[in-house]
Amino acid sequence: MQAISNNPYRVLGVLADATAREIYRQSNMIKKFLIADQISPPDCSFPQLGIMNRNVEKVNAAIAKLNLDEDKMTAALFWFYKGNNTDELNFEALKDGNVAMAKYNWENLIIETGENGKKYWKNITQKNYSAFHNWFVLEFFGNPNGSFIANIKFIESDYYTDLIEKATHSTFTITRKELQLQFLNIILQEIENDTVDLSMDEFIKTVNNENFSAKQDFLKGVSLKLVSKLSLQIEIARKQRIASGANAAGTGETLYKQAENDLELLKSITDAQDFTYSDIANKVADEILQCGIDYFNYYENSSTDPSSLAIGLYQKAKTIAAGLVCHQRCEEKIKNLQEWINHVSERKMQRKIESDSNAVVQLLAEFERKSETIANAKSLINQSKPYLDAIKNVLEASDSAYLALSTRIASIAQNYIIAEVNKMQNEVTREIQLKETLKEAWEATELLGSLDMERDFRTDRYTPSKASLKDIRNQLEL
């Protein structure tokens, strides 16, 4: 942790209660040894706690960081100081490299073990108050989770002013709540910068399990930071989604991964029913859902199947949704998409016959504007037959959509045949012309019979019409 490993007091090799004169004398001595490229005598930098490469620039920077009382206090929160005589013995042990002894001595003053083997904090007294602070500084190197509570307890006690007085050597004042907030926010910053081996989840969980003056104010501040962070992530996702529907699924997945842990953390702080949590959770869920919708809409009518990624986002959004309206919207989208998935085979077939179906529809529109003649009936049948056969090969002859389309062709063609035959019968024509027309009509009717038709049409219209035409032909002895 940078606040400890690069602490100004450590760089200067002094304790946090060092006077200005001691700091001046120690810093000058260190710089002389550095300039001479010699090793300085053992001091309170305690190299066993981690490597620290001193140079003149670092020493001067450390001195500058201890000019103001506020800065001295900030540094003192994360460095050793002498509160009573027992501390001095432990500092000598640290100088000798005996970290285990110093830790053991301080730990015995602040922690006790119950009959069940569980460890408990001891009450803070005149004899052990500084041990809470110094043990934290030492322990935080190897066990950051939980050890910082020792310093919180120290600041919560009436003895926290001792550190203020000894670090600043002035009438500088700061409340315990302000000092706790400052302390926790520095740790929080290092967690965000990944300079300490402590996760945000562990940190907040430990804070949540304790009671102290600044707890609510600190957690409120964390909540506001989380909401701000999530809001920014939502806005970035929104812009990326609008810019590219093709990449909207990836955008939604990224937002989910970014927001998942932060939302859980926020929920642990505020409770799931709290408006602060539910409001931002619903906004995250809405954006993830919309990413899935936009992705699906972009690829719905293409050769790419968007259903798997889209429904995955819908389900993720549902797990996040904290409000009834948002939850119901997610469920509705999941239900509708599932129905779409269930009919995927039908859509694949439709895509296969799309061009042939369009060709038949175009022929129908074209021939509906032509004159009702037997020649046009034959032409319609002959031109549509290859397309109808192609559709039948995909859907099969019994498919209702195919039969409806084929029957429509048959119906128009039959009307054309009947219309020309009726016209010839109503006009005064030579028998030879009528016979020729009936011959063509019979050929067209036979050709018409090669088309697949709906059962009712074949039974009620085609077959009776063919029988009537046959009777007329028989009468004329054809």
Image (cartoon, grey):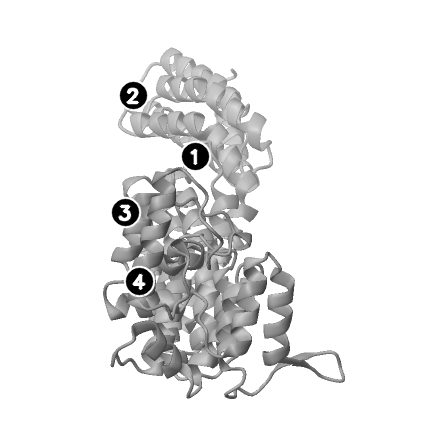
93 left or right of 291 in image = right
Q: CA distance from mark 1 to mark 3?
A: 49 Å
Q: Position of residue 292 (x, y in %)?
A: 42, 49
**Which numbered disc, 1 or 2, marks the residue that appears first in the sequence?**
1
Give the residue pinned by disc 4.
Answer: 228
Number of marks in picture:
4
Q: CA distance from mark 4 to mark 1?
A: 63 Å
Give the residue pinned by disc 2.
Answer: 428
**Which numbered disc, 1 or 3, marks the residue that appears first in the sequence?**
3
Helix, strand or loop at label 2? It is: loop
- Cβ atoms at labels 4 and 1 below 8 Å apart: no
| Amino acid type, residue under disc 4 in the picture | Ser
| Amino acid type, residue under disc 3 in the picture | Lys
Depth-wise, is mark 2 or mark 4 nearer the camera? 4
Depth-wise, is mark 1 or mark 3 nearer the camera? 3
Depth-wise, is mark 1 or mark 2 nearer the camera? 1
Q: CA distance from mark 4 to mark 3?
A: 17 Å
Give the residue pinned by disc 3.
Answer: 239
Label 2 Cα neighbours within 10 Å, binned few <14 / some 14-19 / many ≥20: few
**Which numbered disc, 4 or 1, marks the residue that appears first in the sequence?**
4
Give the residue pinned by disc 1.
Answer: 408
Helix, strand or loop at label 1? It is: helix
Helix, strand or loop at label 3? It is: helix
**Which numbered disc, 2 or 3, marks the residue that appears first in the sequence?**
3
Label 3 Cα neighbours within 10 Å, binned few <14 / some 14-19 / many ≥20: few
465 left or right of 279 in image = right
Q: Is residue 231 visible?
A: no
Helix, strand or loop at label 4? It is: helix
